[in-house]
Amino acid sequence: MTTTTISTPAGRRASGPAQPAAPRSRRRRAYSSDQPRRSPLLTVLMLLALVYFLLPLFWLVVASTKSNADLFSSFGLWFAQSMSLWENIQAVFTAQDGVYLLWMRNTVIYAGTAAVGAAFLATAAGYAFAKYRFPGSNAIFSGILGSIMIPTTALAIPTYLLFAKAGLTNTPWAVILPSLVSPFGVFLMRVYAADAVDDTLIEAARVDGAGELRIFFQVALRLLVPGLVTVLLFTLVATWNNYFLPLIVLNSPDLFPLTVGLAQWQATAAGGSGSRPLFSSVITGSLISIIPLIVAFLFLQRYWQSGLATGSVKG
């Protein structure tokens, strides 16, 4: 039998049998306990949440394939016998001399300009709050945080009165300028810039003789791209789906975005008790309107992935 030498408290050595190795089953249980455990309850909850978010989109796709009559005579969550998707698309783009394309162009201009401008301003402001110390910075940032809690609908009427005094109502600027302000984007970019941009990089650039603007555009901005893209997508979706502000500040149908234009079609269809075949056009137009958002998300998500990979390597 193999013996081992054991040290006693008195410094003497005693010989005894070697301790047997841990049983294989015990080691297997210890190994399995380190692995992440799956919870059936959490799995069910996640599946329910997935159904909750995807069910309206599925209904929208199904309803876009139905005619105006089939919308009221067939089951809502499945296709009708006749496929009317192509006819609905043609009706959307030919109704009122193709005004849907005009609304789409307006929406792209409003949302694209506001998203790029808001993302840049929020990135610059967040970087300044994170990396510079100036009098009143905490008070100003606290005011920005407080403005997040104010609903945008509460600011619509004051915004209209302000723009009416400036003569900007019924112009694209009445929709673009308020959308350039993103308090949540400033907060997000301050938190992100505090960790993404190392102070040693800024000090090294200053030692090399670079100015503050050059440091921001050539050093910091490249590191802040994932956060900038996040703010851009948030603002893009918010401006694309904005309904109340354009409804108040715009009077001309030629300046309407898709939200206001489709709401007018819906009001016309509801006022005619469904006699005019506009319900299918409204639903199909809504389906077409979300396609650019899906494309933008799929195109810009690689910047999120690159940012997460950079952070993991840096950590």
Image (cartoon, grey):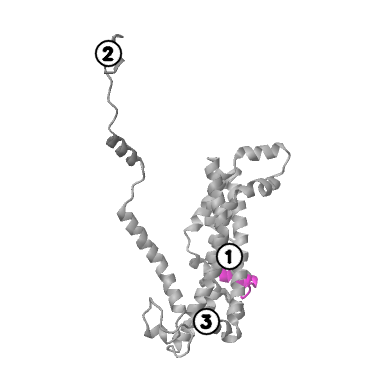
Residue drawn at (35%, 40%) of the image: 34
Tell me which numbered mark, 2 or 3, is placed earlier along the sequence. 2
In the picture of the structure, the residue carrying the numbered disc 3 is 86
Q: What stretch is highlighted in magenta?
A: 159-172
Foreground: disc 3 or disc 1: 3
Whether residue 91 is visible here, answered yes or no, is yes
Q: Dot 1: what SS? A: helix
Residue drawn at (43%, 88%) of the image: 274
Residue 183: name its quadrant: bottom right
Kindly identify the amino acid type of the residue bearing the numbered disc 3. Answer: Trp
Residue 170 highlighted magenta (yes or no) = yes
Q: Dot 3: what SS? A: helix
In the picture of the structure, the residue carrying the numbered disc 2 is 15
CA gap, disc 2 and disc 3: 89 Å
Residue 201: name its quadrant: top right
Picture disc at residue 178: 1
What x and y, as percent, mark residue 315?
A: 52, 40
Kindly identify the amino acid type of the residue bearing the numbered disc 2. Answer: Ser
What x and y, as percent, mark residue 216?
A: 66, 47
Badge 1 local density, few (<14 within 10 Å), some, or many (20+)? some
Q: Is residue 210 above or below residue 82?
A: above
Q: Is residue 127 above or below residue 92?
A: above
Quadrant of the image containing the N terminus: top left
Q: Nearer the viewer, residue 246 or 86?
A: 86
Residue drawn at (27%, 23%) of the image: 19
Whether residue 140 is visible here, answered yes or no, is no
